[in-house]
Each structure stands twice: as C-alpha cells, then as structure tokens.
Image (spheres, grey):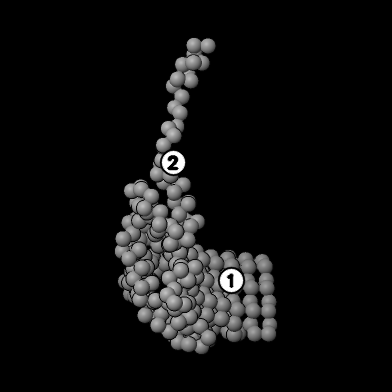
C-alpha cells in the first residue's frame, strides 16, 4: 500500500495552464504544418518562438490555386505582391526544402515571376520533389522558358513540369539529375530533339517517365534510360527506340486515334 502511494506521489500531473501547443514535438508540428494551407501555416508563427522556428524551417512549400485565390485584390491577381510574398518566404527560410509546388494561373503578366531566382534558392536548399504547373502558356500562348538553373537542382528525386518551354541543354559543368527517379512532362515544348536526349542522359536512375502532349522532337530514343521501368506517352506519333530499355515493364502509348497499352 505504501509503495502504491509512493508511485502516486511520483506521478506527474499536467498543470492546468501547461502550453501543449508550444510543447508539441517537432515532427508532429511539421505534420500539422504540411497539412495546412500555406497562409494558415504562416499564421502559426505567432503562437510561440518554437512555432516561428517551425514555420521558418518548413520543408514542404505549396503555392497552389488556393494560395493565389487568397491573394486576389478586387478579383484580380496582384502578381507583383504575390511574387514578393514567395520571394520573402524563401529568403527567410532556414534549412532544407524537400518539396516545392508552384501553380501559376493563366495571365500574361505572370510570365515575369522570379522563377529563376526561386530555382537558384531551391537548388541550394536540397530540393527533392519539384512540381511547376504553369498556365501562362496554355491555349496557344507563348510558353514560359524554363530557366537553365533548373539543372542545378541536383538532389531532385521527382520532377513534374507543366506547360513550359525547354531550350537550354544542361551546362557543361552540370552533374545532371543523378538521383531523379520520376520525370513527368505535360505540354512541354523542346526547342529541338537533342534537348530531350540531353535531358534523359542526365538522369541515370530514371525509372518512371511520362510525356503528355510534348512537342519539339521527331523521334524518341531511350538509349540513356537503361533502367527505365515505366513509360507513358500521349500526343502525336513519333518513332520510338527501346533497344537499350531492357528493364521496361510497363508501356502506355496513346497516339491520336490509336491507343496501345502493354505490360511485360
């Protein structure tokens, strides 16, 4: 009985005024911030000094459709203000960034966003998953040219590009995307076919490739994608060369009026 009473005395009873929010473990705080819209995540920085540190070191930054809608003024996008907000968030960020998603709505003035500056920062922050969805060049309008500093993001594991133009070959001092496993390109325009070959040759670990309505090449050779396992192609028909793709397990092709899916 005495031992039982002793155990009760040693049991720590939470104080009524204990700040549970401020004392959350960092991994739980990160999970919460990851699931909040970015504007709400930013507001958590006023909760305490700890939460300010959590916000400034958040590893997943998502500037999606909701983010743009929240920063409309009188029904219009204040693109300069939005550009400044994104730049300031990156400028004050402390630590690595594992995921960055950027949605850009269809508006001609949005072609002037500081994408080159942001990609340069992300390359130094060890970006792993990058998704750029750009509707500025949608519907026949000139596409935004993807800055060449994209090739400096050497830690990428997954890359998705939507509606951009690629007219730069990887720089001579570029080590390539040595860790890239998944590449998804939608409505991407290549200046010439050699750019696609250069891009693929810089991805020695690529296992999943998706090309949807991409243009600018007359054929597709996969001689540098020796461990490619999954391939999806939609759009206009082009000759394909698979002779070095010995690990290919799944192929899905959709050309104009013909569709073919194969599993191996």
The one nearer the camera, 132 or 182, is 132
Is residue 256 among what the camera can see?
Answer: yes
- Residue 42 vs residue 216, the one in the foreground: 42
**Residue depicted at 32% across the width and 56% down the height:** 94
Q: Neighbour class for label 2 at 10 Å: few (<14), some, many (≥20)?
A: few
Q: Position of residue 143 (x, y in %)?
A: 45, 84
Judge whether 212 appears above or below 89 on screen. below
**Residue that numbered label 1 is attached to:** 231
Q: Secondary structure at mark 1?
A: strand
Crowding near the residue tagged with mark 1, few <14, some 14–19, many ≥20 C-alpha atoms within 10 Å? some
Q: Rounded to the nearest whole Å, what is the CA distance between mark 1 and mark 2?
A: 48 Å
Q: Is residue 130 visible?
A: no
**Spot occupied by residue 264 in the image (x, y as percentages of width and height):** 66, 66
User: Relative to 256, is 57 above or below?
Assistant: above
| Mark 1 or mark 2, earlier in chain | 2
Q: Which residue is mark 2?
A: 20
With 196 as the anchor, is 52 left or right in this view? left
What is the number of callouts on the image? 2
Q: Position of residue 217 (x, y in %)?
A: 51, 84
Element class at badge 2: loop
């Amino acid at each position: 009985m005495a031992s039982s009473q002793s155990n009760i005395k040693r049991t720590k009873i939470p104080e009524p005024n204990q700040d549970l929010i401020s004392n959350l473990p960092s991994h739980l705080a990160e999970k919460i911030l990851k699931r909040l819209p970015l504007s709400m995540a930013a507001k958590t920085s006023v909760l305490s000094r700890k939460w300010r540190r959590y916000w400034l070191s958040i590893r997943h930054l998502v500037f999606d459709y909701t983010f743009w809608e929240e920063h409309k003024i009188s029904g219009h996008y204040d693109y300069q203000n939005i550009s400044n907000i994104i730049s300031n968030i990156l400028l004050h960020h402390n630590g690595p960034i594992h995921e960055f998603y950027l949605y850009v709505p269809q508006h001609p003035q949005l072609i002037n966003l500081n994408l080159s500056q942001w990609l340069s920062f992300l390359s130094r922050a060890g970006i792993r998953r990058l998704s750029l969805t750009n509707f500025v060049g949608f519907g026949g309008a000139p596409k935004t040219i993807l800055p060449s500093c994209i090739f400096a993001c050497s830690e990428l594991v997954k890359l998705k590009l939507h509606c951009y133009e690629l007219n730069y070959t990887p720089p001579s001092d570029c080590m390539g995307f040595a860790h890239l496993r998944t590449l998804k390109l939608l409505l991407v325009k290549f200046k010439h076919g050699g750019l696609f070959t250069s891009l693929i040759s810089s991805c020695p670990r690529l296992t999943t490739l998706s090309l949807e309505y991409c243009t600018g090449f007359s054929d597709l050779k996969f001689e540098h994608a020796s461990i490619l396992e999954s391939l999806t192609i939609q759009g206009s028909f082009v000759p394909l060369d698979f002779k070095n793709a010995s690990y290919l397990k799944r192929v899905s092709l959709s050309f104009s009026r013909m569709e073919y899916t194969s599993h191996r």
